[in-house]
Amino acid sequence: MHVVRSNTFETNSSSIHSITVARSKMGTITTNERFTDVFPITENNIVVGVGQFIIDFVVLHDMKNVLSYIYTATYLIYGRKHKKYLRKINKLLKKKLGIKITWLKPKKFEAQIDHVEELKSWLVDLFNDDDLLLDTILYGCVTIDNDLMGVHTSSHTEKTVSENYYDFRKGHK
């Protein structure tokens, strides 16, 4: 007997990506306070390229690597329109932190994220909320895992939002 399932997307991929952001309320800093008094910056110019974020277990929790993950997802999902989103990041970081980002031009096949299309709703949230975007860049933690390694159980795309944190997970069912 054969079982045929319709309207079901299945993959043998076991990669899971989890993006967790502590909400800092950085957007509430008054004009009398300098943002850099709250968040000390050691670099004024950061060079960021795309990356290959695939099955290996890795935790990205520093600004440069989180920016690289955002750049890679934006580049892969929005194609030629990705520069519009990079300009938004540039403007926000320049205004809040006085940081200039230099985005390296991706080389062919250099940008990779497993099942990147599942990140589109995350990017929509990110670019529609400046506070979330800034919190993600400064305090975000991206965990890339393979559930076959036994670190996490299998997952699917889900989002949890509260006043204190934002959590987005993508993976397989």
Image (tube, grey):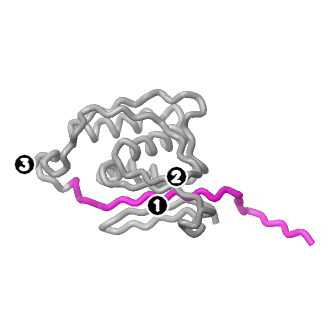
Question: How packed is label 3: few (under 14 Cα within 10 Å), some, or many (20 or more)?
Answer: few
Q: What residue type is labelled 1?
A: Phe
Magenta stretch: dominant SS? loop
The magenta-colored residue range is 1-27
- What amino acid type should be assigned to the residue bearing mark 3? Asn
- Quadrant where the N terminus sits is bottom right
Coordinates of residue 161 in the picture (x, y in percent): 39, 66
Q: Would you name the residue on which mark 2 appears?
A: 119
- The residues bearing labels 1 and 3 have C-alpha atoms spaced at a distance of 34 Å
- Do labels 1 and 2 touch, CB within 8 Å? yes
Tell me: 34 left or right of 101: left
How far apart in space, not on screen, are marks 3 and 2 (Cα)? 37 Å
Q: Going 59% across and 52% down the picture, which residue do you hit?
A: 55
Q: How far apart are marks 1 and 2 (CA)?
A: 9 Å
Q: Is residue 24 inside the magenta stretch?
A: yes
Determine crowd level at label 1: few under 14, some 14-19, many 20+ residues with C-alpha closer than 10 A.
some
Specify whether 94 is left or right of 124.
Answer: left
Tell me the residue that label 1 is attached to.
168
Residue 159 location (% of width, % of height): 47, 64
Residue in view at x 35 percent, y 52 percent: 136
Q: x and y percent of residue 168 in the render? A: 46, 61
Position in image of residue 133 (x %, y %) = 34, 50
Depth check, mark 1 against mark 3: the one in front is 1
Query: For this rendering, which residue is in front, 104 or 91?
Result: 104
Tell me: 122 left or right of 118.
left
Quarter holding the C terminus is bottom right
